[in-house]
Every structure is written in structure tokens, then in C-alpha cells.
Amino acid sequence: MISLFKFFSKDENKSKDIAKERLKLVLTHDRANVSPKYLDMMKDDIIKVMSSYMEIEEEGIDINLTRVANDDDTYTSTLVANIPIKKMKNIGKNNG
Amino acid sequence: MGEVIVITSGKGGVGKTTTTANIGTALALEGKSVVMVDADIGLRNLDVVLGLENRIVYDLVDVVEGTCRLKQALVRDKRFDKMYLMPAAQTRDKNAVSPEQMQKLCNDLKEQFDFVLIDSPAGIEHGFKNAVAGADRAIVVTVPEVSAVRDADRIIGMLATNDLSNPLLIINRLRVDLVKRGDMMNIDDTNEILGIDLLGVVPDDENIVISTNRGEPVVIDEDTMAGRAFRNIAKRLLGEDIPIMDLDEEDTFLDKIKRLLGMDKNKKH
Ligand SMILES: Nc1ncnc2c1ncn2[C@@H]1O[C@H](COP(=O)(O)OP(=O)(O)OP(=O)(O)O)[C@@H](O)[C@H]1O
Ligand SMILES: [Mg+2]
């Protein structure tokens, strides 16, 4: 019954679904390139969050969207951030 | 006062010129006055698609340089009442015109016509900037393939920075057979990715090739699928509420039985 059900259901791995997934990934990157404002906004928010845990060197921050190759020849859009830390804040220590 | 609509795509060869010629003709068939402007300077084609290539005397560059008056460069299409072509220059390059000059040209034309349709060249460079300079609205043409949709997305971003933030989408060359078996992105897939309003869907249709051979836009022939699609698009532009043609993506029950019995001629191997 299950196999019959499967037969009548949609095929797995349709090429149009692969196309759609690839497009979604590549557009994440393209769109970020089109609008640097988007990355800047995100950068500001990341700094805000991290600043409550550590002192960071804002001038040295480098945040980028890049594509990282997977083993199976596909790519994953990846956020790569280089954030120099001046020192950790002294909170939450010895509390757990 | 008329409206200036630019037809653009980013990627080349997806059907901008075909779309411009057919929407223009369909609007003329609806009784509107229309001028189609070929902004593809150096690579003009709208003239041959419309079958008006032998009637050109002056062109767009002659107008902006003051060699002739605006009226002298307009080629009237004798088959229709109020349909005109403003041809591009063929022997000049696209730097012969500036965005400011295009803007002035569009403003002059929309005083005289209900619709001014601009056929944009491929690409995102100078020619694109000229084509969008005087536009009030934009239509983005794409085909349901990865590279074309990607370029369409890029163009949508660039249109927004040129004050054209709500472009309308035309999906061209859709193949129902491929969509049915899941080998071409369907209307919903394309819509979901690009996220702009859909103006229409045009099937891949050999009648486009035949009509282009003859220099007669396919909309003239009401019996063709593509012709009907372009008529519907023109009517939607005029505000009529016409549903997008229904393409059943799922196989029908009968298709499945046929496939089970090995009778499906489109079976994948
Ligand atoms: N719906 C369709 N069905 C079949 N063929 C089509 C369809 N639309 C366009 N074509 C064909 O595709 C080719 C390219 O079309 P067209 O010249 O309109 O594209 P374009 O976007 O203007 O190209 P360019 O970027 O070079 O200006 C032509 O040969 C045309 O006949
Ligand atoms: Mg063209």
C-alpha cells in the first residue's frame, strides 16, 4: 500500500526543485551584493549583541557572505565574520 | 498624458523585443495609441519583428541630435490605426544618447500617445540606464531557467534604485510538458523567488518564429496560444481582471494510468 501510495505521489528530486534551491542560495548572495546597506545593518546588530559579552575592535571587523564548497560539488552560502576581541567581559563567570 | 513602460530583462534573448512588439500591437488592437521605442542602439531588431524595416528614414539618435523633428522619425504602421515605431540607430553606439535625452524624448512622446513602450537592450550598462530613464513603470521578462531568473532578480534590484520599484513580471517560453514532469520551474516557483506581481505567462510557441519570419506580431492571430497570452497581458495592463491561464502541474489520473501501462509518450528514460 505504501509503495503504491508513493507511486502516485510526486517524484523526488525533480530538476525544477534543484533549480529552485540553487537559485535561492545564489540570490542570497547576489542580493547582499546589490545592497551593501543590508550587510551594514546586520553588522551593526551583530556588534550590538557581541558587545554585551566582549569588548571588540570595531574598525577591524570584517563580515562577508561567501559561498563555501561542499563535498558533493554544491555550495552553501556562508556568513564569514572576522571580529577582533580586545577582552572578554567579566560576566557570567563561575555562575553555572 | 500617456504612460511610459520599459520592457527589460537583464539576460539577453529572453523575449523583450517579441514582448514589446506584441503588447504594443495588442494595445493598438484595443484602440489605444501606441509608440514603441527601440532603445537597443547599434543592435536594433524591433523594426524587423514588426515588419517595418523598409520604412525607416530617421532614427532615435537623429531626433536627440536635432537632425530631424520627432514626427519625422516615427514610422507609422499602416496595418493599425495608431501604432508607431521609433527606430534605434543601427550604425551608432549606445553612448550616442544620454539618460537625460531619453527622459526628454519619453516626455515628448507621452504627450502624444496613450502608451510609450521602450524595448530595452540586454545588460545592466549604459543602454539599460537609457531605457529606464524616462519610464513610469517597468515590465521584467524572464524565462523559467536558473540564469534568466537570477538576472531578472538583479534587474529588479536595479530598477528599485532607479525609482521603478514595483515592476511587473512576464514569464516567457513556459513549456507545459516540462512543467508537468517537474523539469521546469512553474509559475508559483518563479513567483516565489522573484516576489513581484505577475502580469502574464507566455508559452513557448513555434508560432512566434513563424510570425517573426513574416514580420507580423503573433497577437494578430487569435488562434495561437502565444497570441492569446499577449492579448491577455495587454488587457491586464488596461486594468481588466483576466485570470492567468491555468497550467495543471500535477499529472492527471489518466496520465498516471498511462504511465503505469507504459503508454506515456513523454516518459523519461
Ligand atoms: N514564447 C516564445 N516562443 C518561442 N520562441 C520565442 C518566444 N519568445 C521569444 N522567442 C524567440 O526567442 C528569440 C529571442 O527573442 P527576442 O529577440 O524577443 O529576445 P530579446 O530579449 O529581445 O533579445 P535581446 O536581448 O538580444 O534584445 C527570438 O528568436 C524569438 O523568436
Ligand atoms: Mg531585443
Image (cartoon, rainbow, N blue to C red):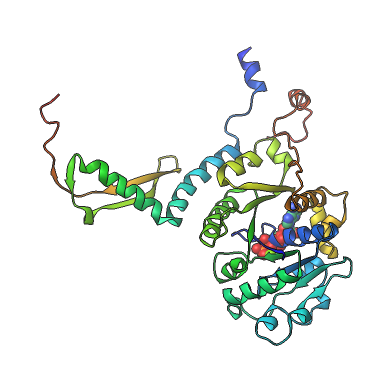
Residue A40, compared with residue B180, is above or below; it is: below
State how many labels appear: 0
Residue B236, compared with residue A13, is above or below; it is: below
In the rendering, at what x and y percent does residue B168 appear? 64, 52
- Nearer to me, B38 or A74: B38
Relative side of B103 to B49, left or right: left
Residue B122 position by quadrant: bottom right
Residue B140, compared with residue B197, is above or below; it is: below
Q: Is residue B186 shown to the viewer in this render?
A: no
Residue A15 position by quadrant: top right
In the rendering, at what x and y percent does residue B157 appear? 52, 56
- Quarter that holds the C terminus of chain B: top right
Where in the image, quadrant-wise, is ligand 1 located?
Answer: bottom right
Residue B219 position by quadrant: bottom right
Q: Is residue A82 shown to the viewer in this render?
A: yes
Residue depicted at x 72% and y 64%:
B2
In the rendering, at what x and y percent does residue A33 appear? 43, 55
- Quarter that holds the N terminus of chain B: bottom right
Residue depicted at x 44% and y 40%:
A72
Which residue extends farthest bottom? B67
Which residue extends farthest top? A1
In the rendering, at what x and y percent does residue B112 appear? 76, 71
Relative side of B52 to B134, left or right: right
Which residue extends farthest front? B1
